[in-house]
Amino acid sequence: MTGVIRRSYQKPGQLIPSRAQHFKGRSIRLSPGRAIEWHSTRDREEVILVFRGSVSLEVRGPRSRIRSIALSKGRAAFLSPQVWHRVVNRSVCDCAMSCSIC
């Protein structure tokens, strides 16, 4: 079937082919105590999907107030454009997740 590429989320790395014009995605394994540091979605939208373990999604809101959202296996979060956020693994187990940006 042309136009279809299959990739495994179980191996950390790029999920979306590099030739994709507007869509990017990565499979990430986050060890306990590790974080994907603060960054912005800028003018894009992002989806975070947890496949194994759990993480805290921290979102910076008005007046720099930080809101923490727990994401566990099977849960997803949608981030609108212009959202500052980070993902932290505060558990004792590895977390496997994907981040997709469009």
Image (cartoon, rainbow, N blue to C red):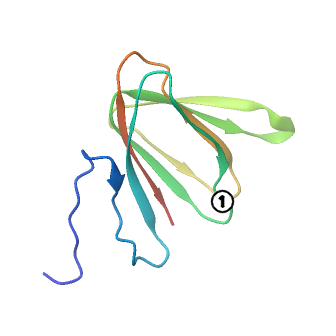
Residue 46 against residue 60 in the figure, above or below: below
Q: Position of residue 44 (x, y in %)?
A: 61, 64
Residue 14 against residue 58 in the figure, above or below: below
Residue at the outermost bottom position: 2
| Quarter location, residue 2 | bottom left
Identify the residue at horizontal 57%, vertical 60% (top origin).
Answer: 45
| Quarter location, residue 73 | top left
Identify the residue at horizontal 39%, vertical 72% (top origin).
Answer: 18
Q: Position of residue 101 (x, y in %)?
A: 50, 61
Tag 1 secondary structure: loop
* 18 sits to left or right of 2: right
> In the rendered view of the protein, which quadrant contains the N terminus?
bottom left
Identify the residue at horizontal 42%, vertical 59% (top origin).
Answer: 25
* 35 sits to left or right of 7: right
Q: Classify mark 1: residues with Cα within 10 Å, few (<14), some (14-19) or many (20+).
A: some
* 70 sits to left or right of 80: left
Q: Which residue is mark 1?
A: 81
Q: Position of residue 100 (x, y in %)?
A: 45, 57
The three-letter amino acid code for the residue at tag 1 is Pro
Residue at the outermost left position: 1
| Quarter location, residue 35 | top right
**Total label count?**
1
Residue at the outermost top position: 92
Residue 21 against residue 28 in the figure, above or below: below
